[in-house]
Amino acid sequence: MKTVYIYTLNCPDTGKVMYVGRTNKPNVRYASHIRSNYFGHMYPVCHWIACVLISGKVPQMNVIDMCSESDSRNKEIEWIRHYLSVNPDLTNVFDSPVRKQKKAEHEKLTSEIRRNRLNRDALTPEQQRKLIGGLSCNFQIV
């Protein structure tokens, strides 16, 4: 039976949990969050990671639980609910009205980025800051 790890990505400045995920290879998953993050990605967590990277820092990853593969989705949801009650800016996507609004804003920006065929490697740091300037307040990076 495979062991699955439930993890959080935390703000490097405050320690605030910004994302909850699950993986069977924490080191590989963490590297993929950092390496494959680009500005045209479809998920709010990627924009948050981009904001952190632009500030010259990296998110912290903490393994918070372990379980069997068959229990992993329920365990992940349990932890998401817990951290959502502590931080309403958690970047996991849900279908609440507030989340739908944030997702719509995110999709609008993503469309613009993809239309312009932009990604992190193609942009100067100044262009990156300009593009995601409005997002940092949505995710309250402090």
Image (spheres, helix red, strand yellow):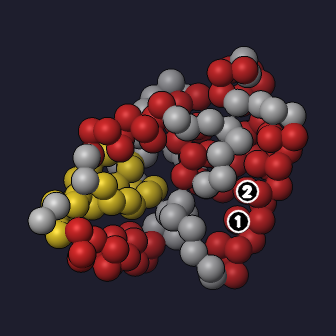
Badge 2 vs badge 1, beta-carbon distance below 8 Å: yes
**Residue on which the image places disc 2:** 106
Q: Give the total of numbered labels.
A: 2
At x 51%, y 64%, the residue is: 92
Which kind of residue does numbered mark 1 sit on? Lys
Above or below, comparing residue 136 to residue 69 in the picture = above
At x 25%, y 53%, the residue is: 24
- Percent position of residue 7, x then y: 30, 56
- Percent position of residue 139, x then y: 59, 54
At x 45%, y 72%, the residue is: 84
**Residue on which the image places disc 1:** 102
Which kind of residue does numbered mark 2 sit on? His
Above or below, comparing residue 64 to residue 62 in the picture = below
Left or right, 141 with reference to 98: left
- Percent position of residue 52, x then y: 52, 36
Q: How far apart are marks 2 and 1 (CA)?
A: 6 Å
